Image: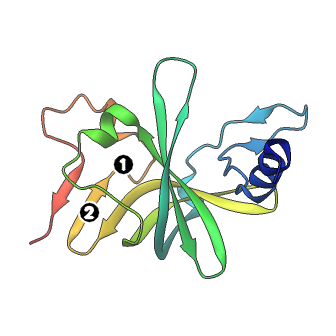
Amino acid sequence: MRPLSLLALLIALAPAPVLADSTAAAGKPAKARFDPATVVTVTGKVLGEQRVDSGKGIKAVRLVIKVGDEQVSVQLGPDSFVDGQKTRFVAGDEVTVKGSKFTYSNKYGLIAQSVTRGTETVVFRSAKGKPAWSSTSTAKAGSVDHS
């Protein structure tokens, strides 16, 4: 197979990126916002992790999980916060996500309030959506071990 044909085949077979922004009326992406009125809980299998450059030197971390027949993008938080947690989520993990549901391109995503694997829960936002990484509390936000 010629290199150009191989490249075209690889591009065609590559999975489409999972975007976590909804589309605004002006055609520009609008940031999804945590809305306590849309909080749901879903259980699924982790397919992988994405790190999306925000253009400000910070990468946003997302999990892609399979819930039923759908792939769902789960916004966790900035890489510095996610990497600072003792609990890591990897492909194959069965997780329960509690978060604010939003829609984009006829799909849905979640802005995580918490993610649980087994007895371990990582809290990303309060019930009102306040990010755990912006907490001024001296208590350590994030991982909670229920053992």
Q: Which of 84 and 12 is in front in this view?
A: 12
Query: Quadrant of the image for the N terminus?
Result: bottom right
Q: Where is residue 78 in the image (x, y as percent from the top left)?
A: 41, 35
Q: Residue furthest left?
A: 147
Q: Nearer the viewer, residue 62 or 27?
A: 62
Q: Residue furthest front?
A: 1
Image check: 139 left or right of 13? left
Q: Where is residue 61 in the image (x, y as percent from the top left)?
A: 46, 42
Amino acid carrying label 2: it is Thr
Whether residues under marks 2 and 1 lie with C-beta atoms below 8 angstroms apart, the answer is: no
Residue 29, picture quadrant = top right
Q: Which residue lies furthest to the bottom in this view?
A: 68
Q: Which residue lies furthest to the top in this view?
A: 56
Q: Which of 88 and 126 is in front in this view?
A: 88
In the image, residue 22 above or below residue 91: above
Identify the secondary structure beneath mark 1.
Answer: loop
In the image, residue 73 above or below residue 116: above
The residue sitting at 21% across, 53% down in the picture is 143
In the image, residue 28 above or below residue 118: above
Q: Residues within 10 Å of mark 2 (few under 14, many from 20)?
A: some
Query: Quadrant of the image for the C terminus?
Result: bottom left
Question: Which colour assignment does the render follow?
Answer: rainbow
Identify the secondary structure beneath mark 2.
Answer: strand
Q: Which mark is residue 47?
A: none
**Residue that numbered label 1 is attached to:** 124
Q: Which mark is residue 121?
A: 2
Amino acid carrying label 1: it is Phe
